[in-house]
Amino acid sequence: MEDQIIVRVANSGDTHYAQTITDEMESSAKARGTGIAKRSPEYVAKKMEEGKAVIAHMPDGTWVGFCYIEVWGHEEFVANSGLIVSPAFRKSGIAKKIKQTIFNLSRQKYPTAKIFGLTTGLAVMKINSDLGYEPVTYSELTDDEEFWAGCKSCVNYDILMSKDRKNCMCTAMLYDPADHYEPHETSEEFKQNSKLYERFMKLKQSKLLQWAFKKEEGSGGGGSKPKSLFQYFFNL
């Protein structure tokens, strides 16, 4: 069955699924007894029209799953939100495919943005981890007030506010593109990301220094190791 499921970027022709999706979001949250930021069918439909959502369905049109993109802090942060799978298709592995597709779409649309998520689900945490997300504190997420306002419909909102938005029942996870060098990037694009470039140069220097030390030891030179690459290559 999984092989027959179509996972793709949603469009304006998919808005008829919006009510079904939001109903299932609410029903699922109640069944788990956990919180979720409530979204209206109109909001979900708009994400489809903007090409900022991924939908999964069977060839006959039966709805299977959904996830969407939210952008915060002047495109500094992106959230892959609202992951939901129809009960009939859960534990089929389709959630991972949806997350992978929405992650790829986010990287395509916002290549320099940090991608984050808040979740109480262990399965989602595992999927996020496989994609390169790492657990972080809430302070590393966006400070956009509109994002946090979306938590008001969550049953755990009082807990969030009592902790000054520093912690809650959800686990925060973040993917920072600066920590993941992509080989296909051109050198100019790579250098434009200063943080990534600096980390790369430090790694390059470290590897080169290790090579220099091994060469020194292999030559039987003995004595103290060179203090820097500059000293080594210029025999100072």
Image (cartoon, rainbow, N blue to C red):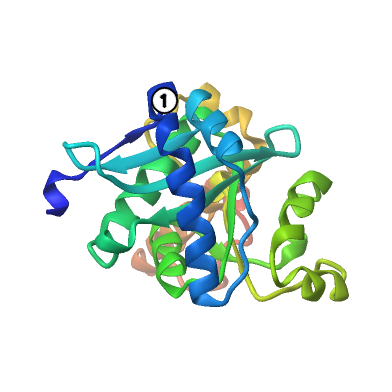
Report the residue marked by disc 1. Answer: 11
In which quadrant of the rendered view does residue 36 lie?
bottom right
- Can you give x and y, in whole percent of width and height, for residue 86 in the image? 34, 57
Is 216 in front, or is 117? Answer: 117
In which quadrant of the rendered view does residue 186 lie?
top left
The answer to whether residue 230 shows anywhere in this view is yes
- Can you give x and y, in whole percent of width and height, for residue 43 in the image? 60, 36
Q: How many marks?
A: 1
Please tell me whether residue 147 is drawn above or below residue 125 in the rendered image. above
Which quadrant holds the N terminus?
bottom left
The answer to whether residue 234 shows anywhere in this view is no
Q: Residue at x 77, y 54 (%)?
A: 148
Please tell me whether residue 135 is drawn above or below residue 107 in the rendered image. below
Please give left or right for residue 56 compared with residue 200 in the image: left
Q: Residue at x 79, y 52 (%)?
A: 149
Specify few, some or many for label 1: CA neighbours under 10 Å numbering under 14, 14-19, or 20 or more.
some
In which quadrant of the rendered view does residue 189 lie?
top right
Q: Residue at x 41, y 46 (%)?
A: 66
User: What amino acid is found at the position of numbered circle 1 in the picture?
Assistant: Asn
Is 38 in front, or is 172? Answer: 38
Q: Residue at x 55, y 68 (%)?
A: 225
- Can you give x and y, in whole percent of width and height, for residue 207 in the image? 46, 55
Identify the element where label 1 is drawn: loop
- Can you give x and y, in whole percent of width and height, for residue 146 in the image? 79, 44
Is 66 in front, or is 113? Answer: 66
